Image (tube, grey):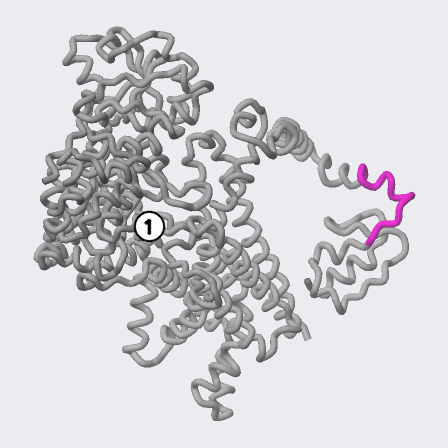
């Protein structure tokens, strides 16, 4: 948000209103200092006093929706689409939906059959994990998500957070595998559902990110061997689809190992995803590196900083700040890509959901299951996207000074 | 759907087999007994199964693997370790299944795999006895009162276009000098809807698939019957790697035990009483008269454990795909030979 629009929205009087800002009456006192924590669009909409603004929506609609014949036609067309689409959808999703009971009730009903979620949610979330022990992956996922959330809060960005991470990871391992503290041992071929999706995505992102920085730096290196290797790796990975990387990792790789030697399936898929994500991230990071003015490098050299000092103190802090949006974009895409592991027979959330629909009794209600799985993915991706917006504003605060 | 899966699998197999073959030349020379000893040492059977095919291998609502193929894995574990739970399941996609077996990632493949000559030879596999005879069949409304596919002369048949399914139907009708009118619809769901809406007299697909469609989509599954004739061969069989006859033998005979037990009327419930049976066949089967176990290099109680823990073939069939399941498939070709089916166990002696 630039300084101009701020002055604009605070001083414009009622009447000609810029889109998105509806100031009324006296100028609202706005505390801009804290605005980086809020959405720009929200920040510029001060609370409206009632009464005199009763006619405002009509005025706004006239100015924005019906101001030209074309706009009027488009508005009417959109309203017509909504009129035809929304009521049946609401009927199907909510009003006529079945929330509990058996599949016979669902077959009679006109609406969605949410009771399939009630029946199958344990299978969808935890796959083939032993039924009576499913509180363990539940707790592990809860811990993991809570920690991920906490790690995003600025007040917690202290050295001890690394310690907490180590502790939680150990706790997760204990919960998922068991075998100690009286927990029965559960081999990881029985893991499935949400834990697989979360672990694959978070670990592949967490390992890929530092790897990608090294690759991006290597690609700019003046040492030919390193540069060639990095360019070769990045271009190879970017040149093939993720599905084929997973295939290589899961199907071809074991054929090259001596008989009897096997690497865990989950680990192979994780490695494949990590390398793939790292290549794409590296290109995003390279974009940041190239955006740093040459003067910064030269100034660092002039100060007598070594290569690593220069990179760590001058280049990377600036470069990474620039590339937050593309990096988060990659994170989100990596999260969604985990659903591809179904082709190598791993039980992620989407696979478990698909399997839930193979039961002939419930097969007609596959749409509900996919909507539910989609909602799960949306929750995680949307949270990431919102978080990145907050992170961006936080980072750009320094630039504005 | 199964047909498209199969063609997908075929395409993938082709692409993979090029490289796989080079690896196979090594795998094929594995020492005799390597798999058998490896399994014994590990303490469990690593079994490749379908990701989720109801009735054959799929986790139930509580995440337990269940199905006809899963019972095959359990029978082998019961024979080897006396405990049918000593199995680790590796869910495999259609593309992965053969390489997974070739690379040694799994010891046994029980994943609704059709036995063919190419797979038996070029792909380096050995197949055990067929544990489910599938094939393309016809489903009709029970109201028509049909008893045989031979009565379908002049019928309209709902069929997917451009598949071997369509080819098989026209071959069958031509061979039997009958006419039919195909109703060709691109999408599976719409094809099924058209059938249940009465747009055609018969729906054709693999029999197991027809049963699943009937269970899932018919208003009342009892209003529809699957005719007994199967017009294509899909013998679904367990497979192992070539090069370990000891292991192949165990898998083969573990299945025959289930068939033989059904023929002798032994079930998981009455097998304890049968231990005192005077029948010499039963005595040999259950290890009361020793010999079979030693020949297979397992405990003499191996067959008893299979019957006790997994059940005979009929029990497994009814539980997973037959009357006791949601699929409600008739035995058909999967009945014992004494009942006109194809299930026949050689003498266990």
Left or right of residue A68, residue A288 in this image: left
Q: Any magenta on residue A57? A: yes
Residue B338 vs residue B1, the one in the foreground: B338
Residue A32 shows in the view: yes
Say which residue appears at 76% left-offset and 62% top-offset.
A6
Quarter the C terminus of chain B occupies: top left
Does the magenta portion include A331? no
Q: Which quarter of the picture shows residue A157?
A: bottom right
| Residue at numbered disc 1 | B85
User: How far across and how far down the image is residue B166, in percent?
Assistant: 25, 22
The reply to whether residue A240 is in sight is: no
Residue B235, given in percent of the width and then of the height, sits at: 19, 32
The structure residue drawn at horizontal position 36% and vertical position 78%, both measured from the top left corner, is: A221
Q: Which percent across, then down, holds residue A76? A: 67, 29
Task: State whether residue B151 is above or below residue B270.
Answer: above
Give SS at disc 1: loop
Q: Is residue B309 left or right of residue B64?
A: left
Q: Quarter of the image containing the N terminus of chain B?
A: top left
**In the rendering, at what x and y percent does residue A129 appear?**
44, 52
* Residue sitting at x 82%, y 63%: A30
Q: Chain of mark 1?
A: B
Asked if A149 appears above or below B322 in the picture, the reply is below
Q: Which residues are magenta?
A: A47-59
Q: Give the prevailing secondary structure in the magenta stretch.
A: loop
Disc 1 crowd, CA 10 A, few/some/many (<14, 14-19, 20+): some
Q: Residue furthest bottom?
A: A304
Does residue A19 lie above or below B135 as drawn? below
């Amino acid at each position: 948000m630039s300084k101009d629009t701020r002055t604009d929205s605070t001083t414009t009087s009622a009447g000609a209103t810029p889109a998105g800002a509806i100031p009324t009456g006296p100028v609202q006192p706005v505390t801009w200092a804290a605005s980086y924590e809020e959405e720009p669009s929200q920040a510029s909409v001060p609370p409206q006093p009632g009464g005199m603004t009763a006619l405002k929506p009509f005025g706004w609609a006239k100015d924005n929706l019906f101001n030209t014949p074309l706009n009027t036609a488009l508005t009417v067309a959109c309203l017509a689409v909504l009129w035809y689409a929304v009521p049946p959808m609401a009927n199907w999703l909510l009003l006529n939906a079945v929330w509990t009971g058996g599949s016979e009730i669902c077959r009679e009903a006109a609406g969605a059959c949410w009771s399939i979620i009630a029946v199958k949610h344990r299978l969808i979330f935890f796959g083939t994990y032993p039924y009576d022990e499913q509180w363990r992956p539940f707790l592990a996922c809860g811990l993991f998500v809570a920690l991920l959330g906490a790690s995003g809060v600025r007040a917690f960005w202290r050295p001890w957070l690394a310690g907490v991470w180590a502790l939680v990871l150990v706790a997760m391992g204990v919960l998922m595998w068991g075998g100690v503290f009286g927990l029965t041992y559960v081999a990881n071929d029985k893991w499935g559902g949400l834990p697989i999706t979360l672990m694959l995505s978070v670990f592949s992102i967490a390992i890929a990110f530092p790897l990608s920085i090294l690759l991006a730096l290597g690609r700019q290196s003046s040492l030919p061997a390193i540069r060639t290797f990095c360019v070769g790796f990045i271009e190879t990975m970017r040149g093939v689809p993720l599905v084929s990387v997973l295939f290589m990792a899961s199907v071809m790789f074991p054929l090259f190992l001596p008989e009897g030697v096997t690497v865990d399936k989950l680990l192979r898929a994780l490695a494949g995803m990590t390398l793939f994500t790292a290549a794409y991230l590296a290109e995003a990071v390279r974009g940041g590196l190239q955006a740093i003015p040459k003067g910064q490098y030269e100034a660092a050299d002039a100060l007598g900083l070594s290569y690593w000092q220069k990179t760590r103190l001058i280049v990377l802090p600036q470069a990474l700040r620039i590339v937050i949006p593309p990096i988060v974009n990659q994170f989100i895409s990596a999260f969604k890509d985990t659903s591809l592991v179904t082709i190598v027979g791993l039980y992620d959330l989407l696979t478990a959901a698909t399997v839930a629909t193979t039961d002939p009794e419930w097969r007609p209600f596959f749409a509900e299951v996919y909507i539910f799985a989609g909602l799960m993915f949306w929750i995680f991706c949307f949270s990431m996207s919102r978080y990145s917006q907050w992170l961006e504003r936080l980072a750009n605060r320094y630039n504005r000074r | 759907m199964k047909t498209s899966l199969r063609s997908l699998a075929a395409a993938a197999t082709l692409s993979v087999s090029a490289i796989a073959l080079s690896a196979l030349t090594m795998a094929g020379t594995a020492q005799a007994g390597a798999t058998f000893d490896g399994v014994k040492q590990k303490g469990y059977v690593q079994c490749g199964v379908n990701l989720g095919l109801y009735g054959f291998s799929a986790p139930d609502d509580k995440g337990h693997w269940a199905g006809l193929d899963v019972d095959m894995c359990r029978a082998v574990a019961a024979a080897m370790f006396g405990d049918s739970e000593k199995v680790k399941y590796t869910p495999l996609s259609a593309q992965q299944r053969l390489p997974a077996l070739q690379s040694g990632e799994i010891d046994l493949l029980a994943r609704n795999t059709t036995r063919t000559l190419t797979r038996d030879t070029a792909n380096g596999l050995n197949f055990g006895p067929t544990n489910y005879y599938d094939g393309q069949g016809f489903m009709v409304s029970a109201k028509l009162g049909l008893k045989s596919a031979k009565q379908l002369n002049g019928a309209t048949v709902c069929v997917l276009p451009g598949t071997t399914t369509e080819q098989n139907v026209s071959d069958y009708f031509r061979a039997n000098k009958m006419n039919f009118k195909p109703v060709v619809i691109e999408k599976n769901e719409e094809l099924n809807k058209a059938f249940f809406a009465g747009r055609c007299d018969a729906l054709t697909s693999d029999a197991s698939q027809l049963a699943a469609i009937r269970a899932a989509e018919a208003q009342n599954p009892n209003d529809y019957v699957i005719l007994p004739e199967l017009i294509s061969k899909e013998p679904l069989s367990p497979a192992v790697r070539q090069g370990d006859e000891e292991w192949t033998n165990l898998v083969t005979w573990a299945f025959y035990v289930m068939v033989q037990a059904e023929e002798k009327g032994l079930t998981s419930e009455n097998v304890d009483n049968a231990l005192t049976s005077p029948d010499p066949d039963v005595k040999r089967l259950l290890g009361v008269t020793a010999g079979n176990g030693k020949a297979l290099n397992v405990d003499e109680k191996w067959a008893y454990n299979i019957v006790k823990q997994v059940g005979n073939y009929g029990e497994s069939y009814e539980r997973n795909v037959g009357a006791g399941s949601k699929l409600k498939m008739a035995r058909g070709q999967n009945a014992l030979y004494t009942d006109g089916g194809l299930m026949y166990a050689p003498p266990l002696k």
